[in-house]
Amino acid sequence: MRSSNPVFSRRGFSRDNGYAGFDAHAQQTQAGGPAAGANPYATNPYAANPYAAQGAELGAPAQAPQRSGAMTIDDVVSRTAITLGTVFLTAALSWFLLPVDPANINTSYGIGIGAALVAFVFAMIQAFKSKASPALILLYAAFEGVFLGVISSAVSTYVTAGAVPQAVLGTMAVFAGVLIAYKRRWIRVNRRFVGFVMAAAMGFMLLMVVNLLFALIGGGDGLGFRSGGLGILFGVIGIVLGACFLALDFKQVEDGVTYGAPRQEAWLAAFGLTMTLVWIYLEFLRLISILQGDD
């Protein structure tokens, strides 16, 4: 099963219903082992079974493999903390250094939009690289933070001062809820789940692009998908889609740890999680802005 997250899709993380695959099709060699190419980290001969016997000779007791340089949960947590910390730091700096007020609103918006475009470019470069680049990932996080700082400042200034903390708390709640549901296996990430999420995400993005085009051509809110009652509906849909992508991200992390992915892949896990959390935060911010604006 290919990941829907472009960060992981080129690396073949996969596990349907709990069975090792890495895009394999249940092929086996004549010796009974995994087929060649089934695991992109096949340099680890025990990737399919972390408790396989290592160096057993003449009935020697089985031992768990001791492979150095493999990705761990601690690696993912630390890299994610660094990436999200960079986002938070640059967002805070842009909030205080680029205040959105009538005197400099155009400058602040221009810098924010420019930072978003630069962040998008860095994200696309990293997504299509064969290996993780911590520098690219942190640059993406830094520019994304600038954009978030400007947007958050604008919402806090012109909509409601409580929108930003509400959006942060909402994002944290979604993250915790999806993590608990995933760990308890209330969410089953299989081919059907991925197919549904991908179809829904493509439809969602297509509608948003069409709405933006109508807004640019005709002005106003375009087709109204991001304001009023429809805006509330699509805001909720966007948050649900973000939660689904979080479940996919958790699966990619679990697969990478299970199959002995190189430690460098932890940066990619952090990258994917950061992009998803930014998505959810922005959807919460937009939804709160619509709700508060209707009061």
Image (cartoon, helix red, strand yellow):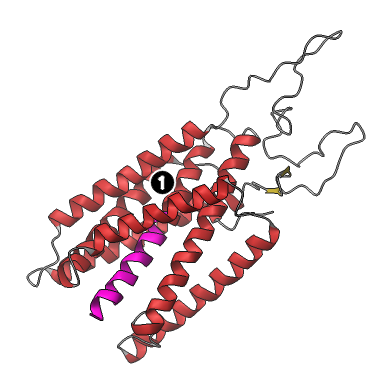
Q: Nearer the viewer, residue 207 or 234?
A: 234
- Category of crowding for the residue at label 1, using alpha-carbon neighbours closer than 10 angstroms: few (below 14), some (14–19), many (at least 20): many
At mark 1, the secondary structure is helix
Query: Residue visible at 55% across and 75% down?
Result: 203
**Principal SS element in the magenta part?**
helix
Lateral position of residue 81 relative to residue 240, left or right: left
Query: Residue visible at 59% across and 65% down?
Result: 197
Quadrant in the picture for the C terminus: bottom left
Q: Is residue 128 visible?
A: no
Q: Is residue 125 above or below residue 138?
A: below
Q: Which residue is mark 1?
A: 137
Lateral position of residue 84 relative to residue 146, left or right: right
Q: Is residue 29 above or below residue 208?
A: above
Residue 107 coordinates in the image, percent (x, y): 16, 67
- Residue situated furthest left in the rendering: 103
Quadrant in the picture for the N terminus: bottom right
Query: Residue visible at 52% across and 58% down?
Result: 245
Query: Residue visible at 73% across and 44% down?
Result: 21
Residue 251 coordinates in the image, percent (x, y): 59, 47
Residue 205 coordinates in the image, percent (x, y): 49, 73
Residue 160 included in the magenta stretch of the image: no
Q: Is residue 180 visible?
A: yes
Residue 286 included in the magenta stretch of the image: yes
Q: Nearer the viewer, residue 232 or 202?
A: 232
Residue 89 coordinates in the image, percent (x, y): 25, 46
Q: Is residue 234 above or below residue 127?
A: below
Specify the segment rendered in magenta.
Answer: 277-295
Lateral position of residue 76 relative to residue 97, left or right: right
